[in-house]
């Protein structure tokens, strides 16, 4: 059995920073970028030596409103084909063993 360890929020932010630097962004452009991971809010800030640091923010500092994702239409649970109505989706692979 393969198990995959969850990547920590800090690791994801560091990878994102590295990727942005490879794409040509400067550290000045990356400052004040905020990240939301679960219930945690983080921001990229510069320290006294002008190096980028990831700082944790209070969850009271930011509120995120998201539009709900659209519900998928009727589809067969066996083969994932989409149908116009639920009846056709249920009948699709009903007789396959």
Image: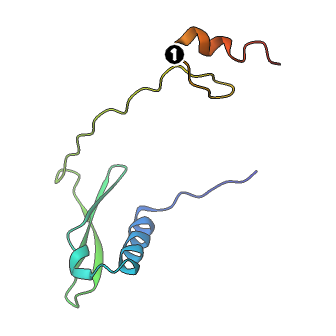
Q: Which residue is mark 1?
A: 84
Q: Position of residue 57 (x, y in %)?
A: 23, 61
Q: What residue occupies the far right of the structure in this picture? A: 97
Q: What residue occupies the far bottom of the structure in this picture? A: 49
Q: Position of residue 17 (x, y in %)?
A: 37, 74
Q: What residue occupies the far front of the structure in this picture? A: 84
Residue 12 against residue 90 in the figure, above or below: below
Q: Is residue 85 left or right of residue 3?
A: left
Query: Residue 22 appears in which quarter of the rendering?
Result: bottom left
Question: Please, which colouring scheme is shown?
Answer: rainbow
Q: Is residue 33 left or right of residue 84?
A: left
Q: Residue at x 46, y 62 (%)?
A: 8
Could you classify mark 1 by the number of other residues whose Cα lies within 10 Å: few (under 14), some (14-19), or many (20 or more)? few
Q: Position of residue 86 (x, y in %)?
A: 54, 12
Residue 54 against residue 26 in the figure, above or below: above
Tally of numbered discs: 1
Q: Is residue 31 left or right of residue 75?
A: left
Residue 43 against residue 3 in the figure, above or below: below
Q: Residue at x 16, y 54 (%)?
A: 61
Q: Quadrant of the C terminus?
A: top right
Q: Residue at x 23, y 40 (%)?
A: 65
Q: Is residue 25 left or right of residue 28?
A: right
Residue in front for this viewpoint, 24 or 48:
24
Q: Residue at x 43, y 65 (%)?
A: 12
Q: Position of residue 64 (x, y in %)?
A: 23, 45
Question: Circle 1 sits in a helix, a strand or a loop, which is it?
Answer: loop
Q: What residue occupies the far top of the structure in this picture? A: 87
Query: Residue 21 appears in which quarter of the rendering?
Result: bottom left
Residue 36 against residue 75 in the figure, above or below: below
């Amino acid at each position: 059995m393969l198990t995959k360890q969850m990547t920590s929020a800090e690791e994801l932010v560091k990878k994102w920073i590295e990727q942005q630097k490879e794409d040509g962004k400067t550290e000045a452009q990356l400052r004040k970028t905020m990240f939301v991971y679960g219930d945690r809010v983080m921001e990229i800030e510069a320290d006294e030596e002008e190096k980028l640091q990831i700082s944790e923010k209070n969850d009271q500092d930011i509120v995120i409103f998201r539009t709900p994702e659209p519900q998928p239409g009727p589809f067969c649970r066996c083969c994932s084909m989409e149908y116009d109505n639920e009846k056709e989706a249920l009948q699709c692979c009903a007789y396959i063993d």
